[in-house]
Amino acid sequence: MLNISVPKDAAHVAPPELVMPFSRQARSTQSRIISPGTTIYFEGFRRSPAYRLVDGCVAISQALRDGRRQIVDILGPGRLFGLSLGDSNPCSAESLTYSHIEQLDENLEPAEAQQEIHLMLRRAQAHATLLGRKTAMEKVSSAVLDLSCQFARTSRSPKRRRVTFTLYLTRADLADWLGLTVETVSRCLNQLKRGGVIDFDHPEIVTILDREALMEIADVGSTCRSM
Amino acid sequence: MLNISVPKDAAHVAPPELVMPFSRQARSTQSRIISPGTTIYFEGFRRSPAYRLVDGCVAISQALRDGRRQIVDILGPGRLFGLSLGDSNPCSAESLTYSHIEQLDENLEPAEAQQEIHLMLRRAQAHATLLGRKTAMEKVSSAVLDLSCQFARTSRSPKRRRVTFTLYLTRADLADWLGLTVETVSRCLNQLKRGGVIDFDHPEIVTILDREALMEIADVGSTCRSM
DNA sequence: CGCAGTCTTGAATCTCCTCAAAAGGCGTGG
DNA sequence: CCACGCCTTTTGAGGAGATTCAAGACTGCG
């Protein structure tokens, strides 16, 4: 008979600290600040309204039955989410830091929603390529580049190539995004640090020292290059 | 210094046997049959028109610079493709068998296009979860289930659970879709065969003997279950 | 100060990959 | 019709990259 083994970790079920959708009464744009770790909507539940992430960081994820989790996208300021059709949410959405979200009107600018869906798709496809075909080092390098674009502090020192950004994702989040384990993510980040490609004193404040090297390692294809 | 190693295989560059877009002259719906291995459009090139796959099988893929390839979706009859925005194709599209495609009018039923984009996104996200978090056996089982739905022969024997379908993908295509190698795909398929879950005499005609077992192994999550 | 959680690091293990070779299928040409 | 070459598939043996397990360091917080 078939004997299928399954990875061990896989047991952390997200605490369903659900955010209640805003009352349908008030028509005007509603916005609120949510704390880190808040589940904005949950995979499989009745479809939530759509939101705009004004500021902060949100992870879109799916889970397998045994708890293994895959983050399918990381959203930064300006991105829309919860735009899916159908009766139930295909993914969960969770804030990774204090985030300012704004509930979108049902009859939102359709062009904007369409643009966002196309962006989601392009990113999901690029991410599939990362997950299926890149090595751990390439994955981590790609992630650092992506996040540096989405979360770069405006105060990038002008002459230097240096860019510093806040890594709202923990090592565990990175692992769930990149299809790796916490340990592998940590090892890769520290290898990049030892190589002088990136730097960090606190684990969540990262500086890119050598963007060219990072792009080289990331093997950024024609598609992602434009992101 | 950093010493990054890269998987070895990664060298098969698709022969750019490009299909010319139909002349813009004729306005009416144009359709044609293309042979296996035809590249319908190529990643990075000027954006192609959109198509409907009337019959056959098409793979949507991306490549890394060194040739490693990731198939991001497999399309069966009825699906639309080439709907992306932007100046260039984010992916390549290639027929995996004789396929009947139909070029879509620029001003296509927008609702249908929107539906297709949403489907692509849902599938891409589910596939990301597969690529990032499933084992080889789970990946192969999921693939067999997915393909059996898209390509099931109508003549499924009514009483039995048995479903037979043509596997238009070679083992190499399956590998590029599932983020595995040819050998691993072959081993998994034969393990499923030995376990009495599937059967095949010719490598490309597959019969599902025990769909329940297959779903069990595939760990189909809430999202993919509906597909 | 001590606890809990995250991060880091090392050692052992395992899954999947790489390399190699043989088996099978299919078209071409003698 | 069979021989041959080419390609895909299968199978085995060995190896590498990532995981697992374990322990220690660091951080924030009550």
Image (spheres, coloured by chain):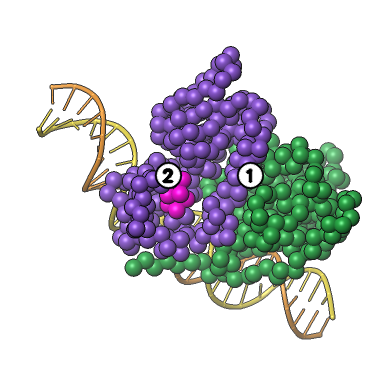
Chain colours: A green, B purple, C orange, D yellow
Q: Is residue B80 magenta?
A: no
Tell me where the magenta segment starts and ends, as one range: B144-150
Q: Chain of mark 2?
A: B
* Left or right: residue A215 compared with residue A7: right
Q: Residue at x 82, y 64 (%)?
A: A35
**Amino acid on which disc 2 is placed:** Phe
Q: Residue at x 33, y 52 (%)?
A: B157
Q: Which mark is residue B118?
A: 1
Q: Is residue B148 magenta?
A: yes
* Left or right: residue A163 compared with residue A142: right
**Decide: marks 2, 1 in contact (CB < 8 A)?**
no
Q: Chain of mark 1?
A: B
The 10 Å Cα crowd at callout 2, few under 14, some 14 to 19, many 20 or more, is some
x%, y% of residue A180? Answer: 58, 58
Q: Nearer the viewer, residue B128 or B33?
A: B33
* Left or right: residue B159 compared with residue A143: left
Q: Residue at x 55, y 30 (%)?
A: B51
x%, y% of residue D17? Answer: 51, 54
Residue extending furthest toward the top: B25
Residue extending furthest toward the front: B158
Residues at marks 2 and 1, CA–CA distance in whole angstroms: 21 Å
